[in-house]
Image (cartoon, rainbow, N blue to C red):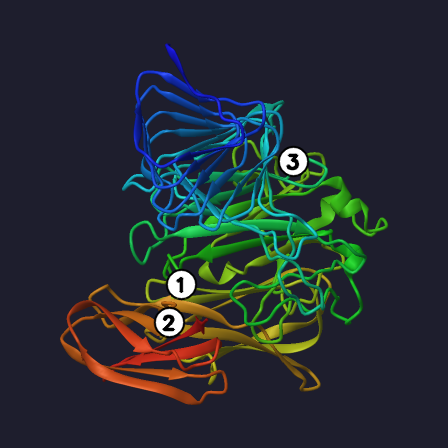
């Protein structure tokens, strides 16, 4: 290929005119580490063409690049134009220098981004990769480099990486002996926690998983690493498609970080609230950090892309380093590790822990060893229901779990009936259980009573059926009564038993971020509706009435004057009533 050299630049080249590069190799060279400043120019890189900037690139207001070839940069990449860098972005950006930064006052939306050169790259601003077309297909190629999303210990450096390409191949990396050589370093701590510490916030990978529905499972791998460069790849396998509010809106976010003191602090911040983690203790209230590994994972939905009852089922594989558990003074038996997730509602417990067939060999993902693998440091779980979607996770020695009321409490709608299942690990002085249900999550009524085992040190499974459940979304909990009359309650789980899409039912409700809340519901006929919003104390704060039309309806309700927090929305017509919790930001 013919090479064409633009005059060398000593410190800074300011481009204010448009130029076309086609069928050639253009190089901007200097021994003084210059940078190219695009101050309003239109740069066109044709297919099969290379533009090499031997230094940094800076894009100012109205600077536009049409890239159908390859743009190589050996210095920092900086964008200060709110409209972005690329007008058309089908090509590749190659970062092939030593340590390089992606920075600026505005984000860059890359199509294909390849990390090369002699050292790792760092995000100093939120960044997107994957392309923005109707069918985005750009690739992030890590090769053997690490992309650092944030700086641990910094109070400001934490940034997100958004992958818009929904294919599982949207992140690639070199591999040796089955282990990734290219990695993504998250590792930054929560912004604020109830333990009194501060940090920059999480550095998540946000991946659009919404448009990819091949044969299941669809396996997404995020090749996380730690400060020591060890492989901590997190695997998320979507086993069902899920139901999106709109096409392309379903994003999952993944982050991880180590706790750095003997009490497993800083404790996690729960992205959607309302409570943050405020303890690492066992059932007796005694500090339990010796039985908890020194690492947390954050797995969360972004963009409210899935209906609450239509989130995809999935499997997740956690991977940890030996340092994460050996630092606990020998309190952990590695093969006894089990996952627990923090429940930010109610009393703020560490929820139920996942136990059952998902831990067995028959349900493991391909290439993942069965059960808890102490050699590969991996553990797999299944997320089969929308109420399993808690956001904060850690791993705990099963002999000393964090506070639990039950190993499992679940409710699921099948053929118009709600199946309720729960499991106890042990029982002391347990007289009976009462299954209770509610339309609003606040006022409960009894469904049935099931005898307890009295005293037991073995796992016992219980089940019950609500043959005539409420229509739409309802809430279930378990009331446990001792022989001496003492009572305890489980966490509340939501269940949707909506009829056909043409029947009256609540689909979704979410904060639109502009002072309004969207309420999406179906109506079987042209009929009157009432939407009422209650605060956490049960006080009515808004009431809206109107006429719905047959089919899908979306209503915007002003909420700009309301404080941030969890609210209960109630949708009703003449015959039915539906309730759901909603977070207002």
Q: Which mark is residue 161?
A: none
Q: Which residue is mark 3?
A: 231
Residue 155's quadrant in the figure? bottom right
Contact between labelled residues 2 and 1, with CB atoms less than 8 Å apart: yes
Query: Residue 152: image x %, image y %?
Result: 68, 49
Question: Which percent across, then down, holds residue 132?
Answer: 33, 42
Crowding near the residue tagged with mark 3, few <14, some 14–19, many ≥20 C-alpha atoms within 10 Å: many
323 vs 464, nearest the viewer:
323
- Res 539 → quadrant: bottom left
Among all residues in the image, which is located at the extreme bottom? Answer: 539
Of the two numbered discs 1 and 3 in the rendering, the one whose residue sits closer to the viewer = 3
Q: Residue at x 65, y 35 (%)?
A: 231
In depth, the one of 262 and 502 nearer the eye is: 262
Query: In which quadrant is the N terminus drawn?
Result: top left
Camera-side mark, 2 or 3: 3
Mark 1–mark 3 Cα distance, whole angstroms, equals 33 Å
**Apparent side of residue 435 relative to residue 329 in the rendered image (left or right):** left
Residue 529 to residue 265: above or below:
below
C-alpha distance separating marks 2 and 3: 41 Å
CA–CA distance in space, label 1 to label 2: 10 Å
- Local SS, label 1: loop
Callout 3 secondary element = loop
The dot on residue 473 is 2
In this view, the residue in front, 573 or 58, is 58
Q: Residues within 10 Å of mark 2 (few under 14, many from 20)?
A: many
Which comes sooner in the sequence, label 1 or label 3? 3
Disc number lying in front (1 or 2): 1
In this rendering, position of residue 549 left or right of residue 393:
left
| Quarter of image, res 353 | bottom right
Q: Which residue does the numbered mark 1 point to in the structure image?
A: 308
């Amino acid at each position: 290929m013919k090479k064409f050299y633009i005059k060398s630049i000593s410190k800074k080249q300011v481009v204010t005119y448009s130029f076309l590069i086609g069928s050639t190799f253009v190089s901007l060279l200097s021994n003084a580490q210059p940078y190219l400043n695009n101050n309003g120019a239109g740069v066109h890189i044709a297919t099969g063409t290379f533009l090499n900037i031997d230094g940094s690139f800076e894009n100012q207001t109205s600077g536009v690049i049409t890239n159908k070839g390859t743009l190589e940069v050996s210095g920092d990449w900086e964008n200060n134009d709110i409209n972005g860098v690329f007008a058309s972005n089908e090509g590749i950006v190659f970062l092939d220098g030593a340590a390089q930064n992606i920075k600026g006052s505005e984000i860059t939306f890359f199509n294909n981004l390849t990390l090369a050169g002699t050292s790792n790259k760092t995000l100093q601003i939120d960044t997107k990769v994957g392309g923005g077309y109707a069918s985005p297909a750009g690739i992030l190629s890590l090769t053997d480099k690490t992309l650092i999303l944030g700086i641990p210990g910094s109070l400001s450096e934490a940034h997100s990486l958004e992958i818009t390409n929904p294919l599982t191949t949207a992140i690639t990396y070199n591999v040796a002996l089955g282990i990734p050589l290219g990695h993504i370093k998250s590792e930054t701590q929560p912004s604020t926690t109830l333990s009194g510490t501060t940090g920059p916030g999480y550095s998540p990978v946000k991946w659009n998983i919404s448009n990819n529905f091949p044969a299941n499972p669809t396996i997404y791998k995020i090749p996380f690493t730690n400060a020591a460069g060890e492989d901590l790849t997190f695997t998320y396998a979507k086993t069902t498609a899920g139901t999106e509010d709109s096409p392309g809106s379903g994003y999952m976010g993944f982050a991880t970080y180590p706790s750095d003191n003997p009490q497993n602090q800083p404790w996690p911040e729960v992205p959607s609230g309302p409570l943050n983690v405020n303890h690492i203790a066992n059932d007796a209230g005694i500090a339990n950090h010796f039985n908890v590994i020194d690492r947390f994972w954050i797995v969360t939905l972004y963009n409210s892309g899935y209906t609450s009852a239509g989130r995809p089922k999935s499997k997740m594989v956690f991977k940890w380093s030996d340092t994460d558990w050996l630092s606990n003074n020998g309190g952990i038996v590695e093969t006894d590790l089990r996952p627990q997730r923090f429940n930010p509602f109610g009393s703020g417990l560490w929820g139920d822990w996942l136990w059952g067939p998902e831990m067995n060999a028959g349900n493991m993902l391909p290439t993942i060893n069965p059960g808890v693998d102490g050699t590969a440091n991996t553990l797999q779980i299944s997320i089969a229901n929308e109420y399993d979607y808690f956001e904060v996770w850690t791993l705990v020695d099963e002999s000393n779990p964090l506070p639990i009321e039950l190993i499992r409490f679940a409710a699921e709608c099948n053929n118009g009936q709600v199946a309720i299942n729960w499991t106890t690990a042990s029982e002391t002085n347990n007289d009976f259980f009462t299954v209770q249900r509610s339309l609003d999550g606040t006022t409960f009524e009894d469904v049935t009573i099931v005898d307890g085992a009295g005293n037991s040190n073995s796992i016992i499974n219980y089940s019950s059926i609500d043959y005539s459940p409420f229509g739409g979304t309802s809430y279930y909990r378990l009331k446990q009564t001792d022989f001496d009359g003492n009572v305890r309650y489980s966490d509340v789980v939501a269940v949707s038993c909506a009829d056909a899409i043409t029947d009256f039912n609540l689909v979704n409700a979410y904060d639109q971020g502009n002072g309004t809340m969207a309420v999406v519901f179906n109506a079987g006929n042209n009929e009157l509706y009432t939407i009422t919003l209650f605060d956490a104390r049960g006080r009515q704060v808004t009431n809206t009435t109107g006429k719905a039309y047959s089919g899908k309806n979306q209503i915007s309700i002003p909420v700009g004057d309301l404080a941030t927090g969890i609210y209960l929305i109630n949708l009703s017509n003449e015959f039915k009533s539906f309730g759901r919790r909603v977070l207002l930001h």
